[in-house]
């Protein structure tokens, strides 16, 4: 297993599912561009509430970055050929929406003085 951060676009709209034990999780696939111009399809699962909620508000084609443990897999295509694959369990999900939300929260956290509270002192520096 590898710890990974991957960025790409959602290949499908994430769906909410249940494990065999009945626990909820979110599932999606992400197209990740590779350095040689090809695209890798990565299966994404999110079990924790925060990354699950972050995935479920997204739609097909949205840009996303995901951090978590990555497992390399293989699957058999319809032609019978074995193909490489990858699956990641999302511990963190970062989107343009969450970035704007964090920036807005940071700006609100910084106190801005009211116009009457600012005192400007005019004088010479020398």
Image: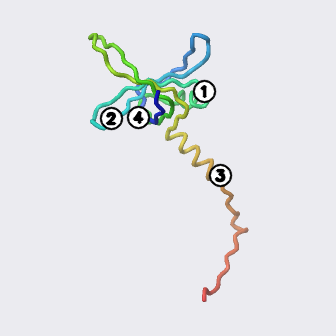
Q: Nearer the viewer, mark 2 or mark 4?
A: 2
Q: Mark 3 sits on what residue?
A: 108
Q: Nearer the viewer, mark 2 or mark 3?
A: 2
Q: Are marks 1 and 4 in contact (CB under 8 Å)?
A: no
Classed neighbour count for the residue bearing mark 2: other residues with Cα under 10 Å, few (<14), some (14–19), many (≥20): few
Q: Secondary structure at mark 2?
A: loop
Q: Nearer the viewer, residue 13 or 81?
A: 81
Classed neighbour count for the residue bearing mark 3: other residues with Cα under 10 Å, few (<14), some (14–19), many (≥20): few
Q: Nearer the viewer, mark 1 or mark 4?
A: 1
Residue 48, disc: 1
Residue beneath the point at 54% across and 22% down: 26
Res 12 visible: no
Residue beneath the point at 50% across and 29% down: 69
Q: Mark 2 sits on what residue?
A: 34
Q: Nearer the viewer, mark 4 or mark 3?
A: 4
Q: Secondary structure at mark 1?
A: loop
Residue beneath the point at 55% across and 16% down: 17
Res 110 visible: yes
Residue beneath the point at 58% across and 24% down: 47
Q: Are marks 4 and 3 in contact (CB under 8 Å)?
A: no
Ranked by sequence position, the earlier of labels 2 and 4 is: 4
Q: Mark 4 sits on what residue?
A: 8
Q: Is residue 65 above or below residue 87?
A: below
């Amino acid at each position: 297993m590898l710890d990974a951060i991957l960025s790409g676009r959602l290949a499908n709209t994430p769906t909410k599912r249940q494990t065999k034990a009945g626990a909820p999780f979110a599932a999606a696939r992400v197209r990740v561009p590779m350095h040689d111009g090809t695209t890798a399809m990565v299966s994404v699962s999110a079990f924790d509430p925060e990354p699950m909620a972050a995935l479920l508000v997204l739609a097909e084609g949205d840009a996303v970055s995901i951090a978590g443990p990555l497992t390399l897999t293989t699957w058999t295509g319809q032609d019978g050929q074995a193909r490489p694959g990858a699956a990641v369990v999302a511990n963190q999900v970062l989107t343009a929406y969450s970035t704007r939300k964090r920036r807005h929260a940071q700006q609100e956290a910084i106190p801005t003085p009211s116009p009457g509270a600012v005192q400007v002192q005019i004088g010479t520096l020398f």
